[in-house]
Amino acid sequence: MTHRPAGPWLTGAVTAGGRSSRFGSDKALALLEGRTLLERACASLHDCPARLLIAPPGRYALPEYLGRWDTHADLRPGEGPLAGLESALTYAPPGWVAFTGVDLPWLTPGYWRTLSAAITPGCLSVQATDAQGRPQPLAALYHTDLLPHVTALLDSGERRLRRAATPEQTGLVGGFPARTFLNINTPDRLMVDG
């Protein structure tokens, strides 16, 4: 297994194919401070030379300033973020994928640089931890070598994203502001000042 040094070679991947059932409408298109949640997620990954949007083709149009995003349908529509990760790992070139959903609008390019700097030999995922020390798998780095494991999990009925990599394969990074992980999964969360 070959791992490149940390740098701007990550494939950025945003999963936006969910049902938004708790939100009541398509949360990817919800506005926060003048930009959609989808635009905000994509902007955090703008430095990545390869960018994937896991969503129904034709559903979203991104502004030109965000660069080119290759849209791919979710391989298992409606089955959650672990299925979105499987799709991202399938479509990404071999190597590291910076993976997030649209509901974490406070991520920045610096966040992804911090995670990529924490990659170590033998590591297959790097995840930030919140103030309570809990890993945050929805805004994390995953190596494409995890694809067979993720597929096997999904085939067995597992849907929890936190199972995508074992603790032994996962590097953890702390010290992020609480607002970083403010999850916008209901409309009232748009009004929360993180």
Image (tube, grey):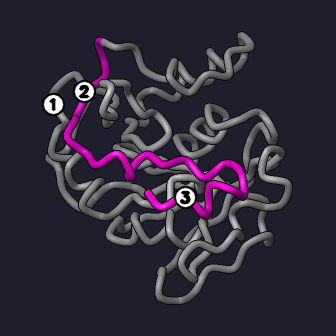
Q: Residues in magenta?
A: 168-194
What residue is shown with label 3? 192
Distance CA(mark 1)–CA(mark 3) = 36 Å
Q: Which label sits on residue 120?
A: 1
Q: Secondary structure at mark 3?
A: loop
The answer to whether marks 2 and 1 mark residues whose Cβ atoms lie closer than 8 Å is yes
Q: Is residue 117 above or below residue 168?
A: below
Residue visible at 60% across and 61% down in the picture: 53
Relative to 180, say whether 154 is above or below: above
Q: If you read the primary sequence from the N terminus, does the residue marked by circle 2 or circle 3 appear first?
A: 2
Could you tell me residue 98's position as x and y percent? 40, 49
Q: Which residue is mark 2?
A: 171
Q: Looking at the image, is mark 2 or mark 3 nearer the viewer?
A: 3
Taking the spot 34% from the left edge, 14% from the top edge, the residue there is: 167
The quarter of the picture where residue 134 lies is top left
Q: Position of residue 13 (x, y in %)?
A: 51, 54
